[in-house]
Amino acid sequence: MNPIMHRRHFLLAAAAGGIALLPAPVACAQDKRPPARLDVPYVPTPQDVVDRMLELAHVAKSDYLIDLGCGDGRIVVSAAREFGAQGLGIDLNPERITEARANAKKAGVGTRVDFRIANLFETDLSRASVVTLYLLPDVNVKLRPKLWQQLKVGSRVVSHAFDMGPEWPPERTEDVGGRTIHMWTIGPAQKAPAADGGRSRA
């Protein structure tokens, strides 16, 4: 089984089995703290998928992109290098963050981007005009109220592989080499139920 399919099967199996893939809030790591246990194998998003995710989000120089689960930083680096955007990558693995910072420096975009070891549920998303992610289906659903509450109207969300549940159907879904991309735009309909924790339907 190739690595991409391995990750997909692992994620789906973990979701069905209730495997915990994120630390409790108290385990939110800073650069000098021991990393939380990582249950998801690292498999980078292919570059053609990265490129299409950024195109779907209409990333521009005026955008600030936050990638949740940034891995080696390729989405943030690509947004800065190809579109002139600023960005932030969040990951729990210190090795990935070190690699991402090195990749940003190599690409000449180190002054436009930042990478942090952090819990994505504790990360402030309010500055983002674009959020990208490649996470578990149930994690996407848990993130949905945070996205609705913290992102401004007009902000775009792009997910590799998994959607946000039936309460928030994507406005665009595309296939790129057998891999699925979903895209949403935050609108007034999402901001209205944000006060009740995102439990209302979009």
Image: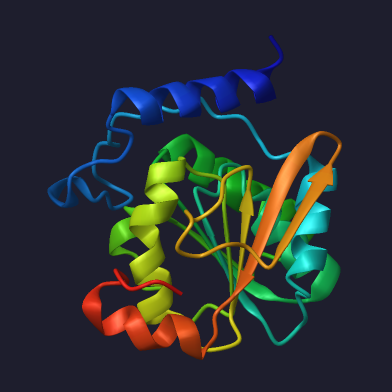
Where residue 85 appears, as percent x and y from the top left, is 71, 76
Residue in view at x 55 percent, y 49 percent: 70
- State how many labels appear: 0
Where residue 197 appears, as percent x and y from the top left, is 25, 72
Would you say 171 lies left or right of 101 here? right
Looking at the image, which is closer to me, 84 or 11? Answer: 11
Q: Is residue 126 above or below residue 99?
A: below
Would you say 165 lies left or right of 84 here? left
Looking at the image, which is closer to me, 99 or 43? Answer: 43
Report which quarter residue 169 is drawn in: bottom right
Report which quarter residue 18 is drawn in: top left
Q: Tell me how the rendering is colored.
A: rainbow
Q: In this view, does 88 lie above or below 71?
A: below
Residue in view at x 85 percent, y 45 percent: 48
Residue 3 visible here: yes
Would you say 25 lies left or right of 161 here? left
Where residue 8 appears, as percent x and y from the top left, is 58, 27
Question: Could you tell me which quadrant the N terminus lies in?
Answer: top right
Q: Is residue 56 above or below residue 98?
A: below
Residue in view at x 81 percent, y 45 percent: 175
Looking at the image, the residue that sits furthest to the top is 1
Looking at the image, which is closer to me, 184 or 39? Answer: 184
Where residue 177 appears, as percent x and y from the top left, is 86, 36
Residue in view at x 48 percent, y 85 percent: 189
Would you say 26 lies left or right of 109 here? left
